[in-house]
Amino acid sequence: MHIPRFPEPAATGTVAIRATPAQAYAVISDPTAMVRFAEEAYRARWLDGATRAAVGARFQGWNRNGRRRWATRCRITDADPARRFAYEVTATPLAVPISRWQYDITPTEEGCTVTETNWMRVPLWFIPVAVLITGVRDRMGANGTYISTTLDRLKAHLEAAPASRP
């Protein structure tokens, strides 16, 4: 069993959205849709015949920062419709665990809140390699900024969708 190197969240953010928890979950739990709102991730595809979120399902993600490009493999750990979606990320091709991403959805009178949280799982020896690959020296700070950007874009998308209007 892998014991997290950094047990506390590295970054987190919350946004209130005028959409139902089910509407939010439908987008959040689809990595191929979420890349439209992310700062680094720009492409994703399901692996092993998966077509939707389920515990154990895997997907590959492609990320970029300027000219730098890298791929990750992700395994879904939580797929609780309208409540939580989470996945563990490994760097390819070494299969080094690097992070966990989790989205918690809470119903409100006007829709829901979405909280996005990131934990660092990267072994200490891999941090200099990750900096070389991604060009990001302050991963925790960058992820905090990226979470805010992602949540703002998700909110704008969901609130613009005709189905989320009363």
Image (tube, helix red, strand yellow):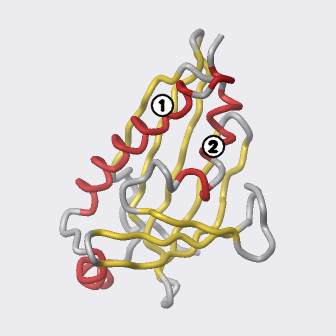
The residue drawn where x is 53% and y is 24% is 159
The residue drawn where x is 65% and y is 52% is 30
Amino acid marked by disc 1: Lys
Query: Does 123 appear above or below 42?
Result: below
The residue drawn where x is 73% and y is 55% is 53
Helix, strand or loop for disc 1:
helix
In percent of width and height, residue 150 lies at: 41, 44
Give the Cα separation between the discs numbered 2 and 1: 11 Å
Quadrant of the frame with the N terminus = bottom right
Helix, strand or loop for disc 2:
helix
Amino acid marked by disc 2: Val
Which disc, if any, is residue 83? none
Circles 2 and 1 in contact, beta carbons < 8 Å: no
Query: Does 41 appear above or below 95?
Result: above
Q: Which residue is mark 1?
A: 155
Q: How many marks?
A: 2
- Earlier sequence position, callout 2 versus callout 1: 2
In percent of width and height, residue 35 lies at: 51, 56
